[in-house]
Image (cartoon, rainbow, N blue to C red):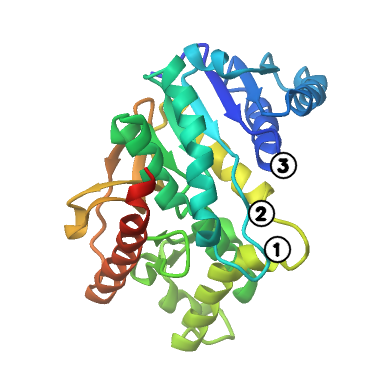
Amino acid sequence: MSIKNAKVSIIGAGAIGGQTACNLMQCNVASEIVIINRNKTKAEGKSIDISHGAALFGNTRVRSGSYEDIKDSHIVAITVGQVAGKNGSRLDVLKDNIEIYKSIICNIIKYNKDCIIVLVTNPVDIMAYTAFKLSSFPSNHIVGTGTLLDTSRLKYFIGDYYNINSSEIETCVIGEHGDSQVTLWSHTKINNVPIKDYINKNCNKDFDEKVKSFLENKTKRAGWDIRACDEHSCFGISMCISKIIEAIILDKKIVLPVSTFFKGEYDISDIFMGTPAVLGKNGVEEIVKLPISSSEIELLHSSALNIKNYISSIKNLI
């Protein structure tokens, strides 16, 4: 059963927050969307602008508000945070973003202890862990965008390289949303055919370790390629947030690779990390454990260790 009269509060009226609000309005899945921002005038401007097009899509009310409006929200999306420099790392802004989250999470739990938090702030796996610890929410009520964008990017790059419709590609990136992410080539198919078999039969290009490495690196560096253009990822990640929120509100029970809490899956525990999970009205309802290869398991453990090391370095901050 979908959530009736769903209310979504979006913290942040920047590019990602504004675009997320616009996407959700167009999806027409929420009755009300509230944009909350430190600069209230900016939130007001974004909400008015989006509202002017709302009648073209449905009855969603979009308005600006304050933290007090969180009190009856079903979902709270956190879209704020410092952005890493062009040649930096998502981890460069970790300490600053933890300080930002201390204030935000304090305000969320002041008004609502039952909502589901969906967050995008980088480094997203560590920030999901931070939100979990600061809020004391059930782990299934904390959902990071994880490797959903990485998975979508990989599909795009595979399709672009082989001139294939990316919607026909099935694949998954798991682990850290960062350099240690793991591409599941063992679960990559095109039109339900294993990628190597499909490419060998239908394409004039090779599919080998060199190509795999090329596609993996394109995916890992995609965000930095956008930064090199004096921009930062906005539209793609906003689509991911909207997809997650829509799945929760409509109780879709669909599987998406999001950052969620591991409780022994693949012998990994006590961290948030990207993995396929069932999303419904209760947030993350189940982790889908895939039968992955031994080499992929090894890489996933390495990615998990990477995240654990960073968590250890900031535990005194949360």
> Residue, x 77% and y 21% (percent of image)?
44
- The residue nearer to you, when weighing 63 against 66, is 66
* 47 w.r.t. 259: above or below: above
For label 1, the crowd category at 10 Å Cα-Cα, with few meaning under 14, some 14 to 19 and many 20 or more, is some
Say what amino acid the circle numbered 2 marks.
Ser
Q: Is residue 102 visible?
A: yes
Classify mark 2: helix, strand or loop: loop
Quadrant where the image shows the N terminus: top left
For label 3, the crowd category at 10 Å Cα-Cα, with few meaning under 14, some 14 to 19 and many 20 or more, is some
Per the rendering, the mark at residue 146 is: none
Quadrant where the image shows the C terminus: top left
Marks 2/3: CA–CA distance: 9 Å
The reply to whether callout 1 and callout 2 are in contact (CB within 8 Å) is yes
Classify mark 3: helix, strand or loop: helix
| Residue 65 location (% of width, % of height) | 66, 17
- Going from N to C along the chain, the mark reached first, 2 or 3, is 3
| Residue 249 location (% of width, % of height) | 47, 24
Per the rendering, the mark at residue 226 is: 1
What is the quadrant of residue 16 in the picture? top right
Q: Is residue 295 rendered to the left or right of residue 237?
A: left
Say what amino acid the circle numbered 3 marks.
Ala
Q: Is residue 262 rendered to the left or right of residue 73?
A: left
Q: Which residue is mark 2?
A: 233
Q: Is residue 149 rendered to the left or right of residue 208?
A: right
What is the quadrant of residue 139 in the picture? top left
